[in-house]
Amino acid sequence: MTANSHCSSVEPPGLDTQRREVECLLRRCELRAGDSWYVLERRWFEQWKEFVESGDQNSSSFPGQIDNTELFEDLDSYHLKERLVENEDFVLVPAEAWHKLLSWYGMVDGQPPLERKVVDLPSTLKVEVYPVQVFLCLHSNMDNVVTAQFSRTDSIQRVQKTVCRSFSVPPGSECRLWMKSSDSSCERLRNVHLSVLDACLSSGMTVIMETRNADGTWPSSRPQIMRTSVEDQDSYQGQPGVCGLTNLGNTCFMNSALQCLSNVPPLTEYFLRNLYLDELNFTNPLGMKGEIAEAYADVIKQMWSGRHYSVVPRVFKTKVGHFASQFLGYQQHDSQELLSFLLDGLHEDLNRVKNKEYIELRDADGRPDQEVAEEAWRNHRRRNDSVIVDTFHGLFKSTLVCPECHKVSVTFDPFCYLSVPLPVSKERVMEVFFVSLDPYAKPVQHRVVVPKAGKVSDLCSCLSEMTNVHPTQMVVADVFNHRFYKIYSADESLSCILDRDDIFVYELRDPEDEQEDQVLLALYLRERSHYRDYGTGSSSYGTSLFGHPLLLSVPRSSCSREALYDLFLQRLVRYVRCPDPTDELDEEDEDDDEDELYKTQTNGISDDDDQDSVDRPGPSQSEPCCSTNSQSDVPAEPLPHLNNMQTPVDRDTATVTSNGTQKQAEEVEAFCRSDGPCSRDSSGTTAPEPASEPAPEPAPELASEPALESVQNATQDKEEDKQEEASSPSPTANEQPMKKRACPKRRRSLFSIQAVNSNGTTERGTGEGDSAVSFSSQPYVAIDWDPDMKKRFYNENEAEKYVKHVSMEVPQQQTTVQLQECIELFTTVETLEEENPWYCPVCKTHQLATKKLDLWSLPEVLIIHLKRFSYTKFTREKLDSIVDFPLRDLDFSDCLLRKHPANGEPPSRYDLIAVSNHYGGLRDGHYTSYARNKDNGQWYYLDDSKVTYAKEEQIVVSKTVQVQYLRLKGQSSF
């Protein structure tokens, strides 16, 4: 089985065997350089896990073919979307697991397998999900550009060979390479033995090759576009430090942190005066051999030279990726994470302590706090002594209390920044769409306030107050790509629902008003393509989902196809026009073309029907397609019992679907009725039963049958009829017209009904013998539209309409908190989590102790990180509260546990010097910064390469501030 195989060709093992085999491979497979792993869409993988864990071969969670559609930017180039996140958008599976899944389920036709290699990077082994994609061209013709992908471990020599091969450069030609970034700066690639990573070649850049002329000269000493920065260095002279940073591709998080640190006077002066050169620590095993410090120094010197509008921090970005693999590539990151890594890296690269001694930490054991604090600080400085410690490190007191023996443990620990929480509301605002039982009512968008720790039932209760619909008549679902991603039960936690989810709440019939059991039916809308889907090895037509799915409560006895057809028409009456007598939808039932009809018919409509209808004069004489009570003035009453409704479609023709059989339509009834087992072949459909003895004719009233008769019996009866016709003499010429006149016209249906899985992509088959498909879990049904019928009778504009409830017009109140409140929350007593217990030396066991932090001493430059991003097991959210703080004279005296500073220490008053801002959400946000220049005292707004003047009031009212940089008042520049 090759990776490019799209159809499953192996009978899959049992579900438990599938689960154990794949789980074992995921558990024991380790990353090894050069191995192949595969990218798999997470939703498909989660559905597969749900399917195998159900243990039911007929579960509606059957995932169908492997489908990575959601990972691609488009389905023409099959380029991966940018900023995909592992375990949120995709999962990585080893090659052996991939091949097993592929052989069991197949793959959507046309999609390429997403094979990725494991690369050995300086600090880790990593699956290279995003290889480096660059543009290649010749200097002689820079308009002719080709695209190529390289691994970060590939050599520049391989890049050179690829250029030569792509442009048919004659062998033996002397050539040289240049790399050009998006900002037009250009640099010579001199060492072809360097790796792509070490050469700082990154995605989006252009590699230019020039070959030596016959006279021994080069076409240019350097390409015309060669510049080391964005502007002409010789002509520009600006304010030092007022310099932008080029965004290399989602690197705004890095630019924001660099701009803030650049405007910390003592640190910047340290690098500008080259004091770091004497303190580089090349032997520190915890450091980066001085490379991070040198790369940072290079950026600072360029920014403060006054000769650049903007600087390209490409070398710095590459060095960071070398030593922190999480920052490889060009995904978005938290600016605070980069800042934390950078401060730690600079400290270790510049640590003046060459050999760290072992120091045993002592508990306070009742000693005075002053004595214990001084001892802790001395011990810290014996192992950690750098400009980072001098500038940013402070000390806080940690108090732990055992809940059993009440042992009190006091220690003093250093910190480099304070991560303080924001007050979190106990409520959350959710926006949902309510779909009424009234088929003429448009969906209504509501804004409700629910408990943050509440359940789905709480959401229904809040919505009930606005709609006057009882909560028990509501079902909540997450709609994604025209299908139900999840249908929630009432007791599920609201934390499972993200703010970005599209939540629909459906009104159902009141169960107390019903006399029999109800089936909750999920209804999808699909459009058939004009061509058969030969690529999958199936005779069925291709389909695509559209519109909004629906949830309906259907009486179990009304699950015949005829009753469901009428029910669906009534439910969709707002945007589906029922045919009137003038619509030419009839077809003649002629023996001469019956075989052709069964071969080419879809949705009960033959391929030639449109042309035939033109030739048929007069209105139809058969029954109307839609029930007569579906008028615009019908009140929103519970739908009538469908057994008593007339069936608008002839049974023998309406169940004919795209593959020319009855089984898909008839199984819908069995789907809602039967609990019998069924077997599925490797493509996900059930295996048909071999021919058997003819069965008796089915009863005329399908809705009263306990289970659906076998489709194969009906099919065999039809075959026997054909054999009888073949063996009997042909009718005379006089008999033929009589037969035509005796056969009535047929009314074609607008759509056909198919039983599908929860993805809406795989049609369900019938079982063996008289058994039918078991739908022990949520039943899913699709109605399939022929494109022409959909165009004539389905109103897409009307289907997409909705109205807004008055609750949507109420402005949301913006929460404002004081910075002091955040500090107080930071120093509040909390109980340790189960994942992080404390070992009590008295109890001799781990305990969930209470913990309290207090500030003891503060550094010269205090960094305060506001924890705007909240993460739980199910949710990730951003807190948009406005944090109010002064720009000057921020007094921390009341926050300090040590009330009497030592002689000579300045008062604990701080002035703001920089802030890092985050706009937008978790996945599509953007970082900028405000900073006060140390030389002229002017505030600037720094947005990547763009720098503008800023006013102080802009900073104070911002709800985007994530990190604050405060400097002790009255400090000199250095």
Image (cartoon, rainbow, N blue to C red):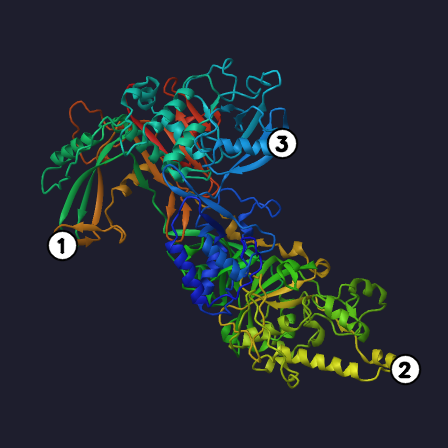
Residue at the spot of label 2: 734
* Mark 2 closeness class: few <14, some 14–19, many ≥20 residues within 10 Å: few
Residue at the spot of label 3: 168
User: Under tag 1, what secondary structure?
Assistant: loop
On screen, residue 276 above or below 630: above
Q: Residue furthest front?
A: 172
Query: Gap between marks 1 and 3, in whole Å?
Result: 76 Å
**Residue 843's disc number:** 1
Q: Nearer the viewer, residue 874 or 492?
A: 874
Residue 342 in which image quadrant: top left
Q: Nearer the viewer, residue 574 or 168?
A: 168
Q: Nearer the viewer, residue 662 or 448?
A: 662
Q: Position of residue 880 (x, y in %)?
A: 42, 42
Query: Gap between marks 1 and 2, in whole Å?
Result: 106 Å
Q: Nearer the viewer, residue 803 or 4?
A: 4
The disc labelled 2 sits on which kind of residue?
A: Asn
* Residue 635 visible in the snapshot: no
Identified at 12% across, 41% down, the residue is 364
Identified at 55% across, 47% down, the residue is 72
Q: Earlier in the sequence, mark 3 or mark 2?
A: 3
The disc labelled 1 sits on which kind of residue?
A: Cys
On screen, residue 265 above or below 20: above
* Mark 3 closeness class: few <14, some 14–19, many ≥20 residues within 10 Å: few
Of badges 1 and 3, nearer the viewer stands 3
Of badges 3 and 2, nearer the viewer stands 3
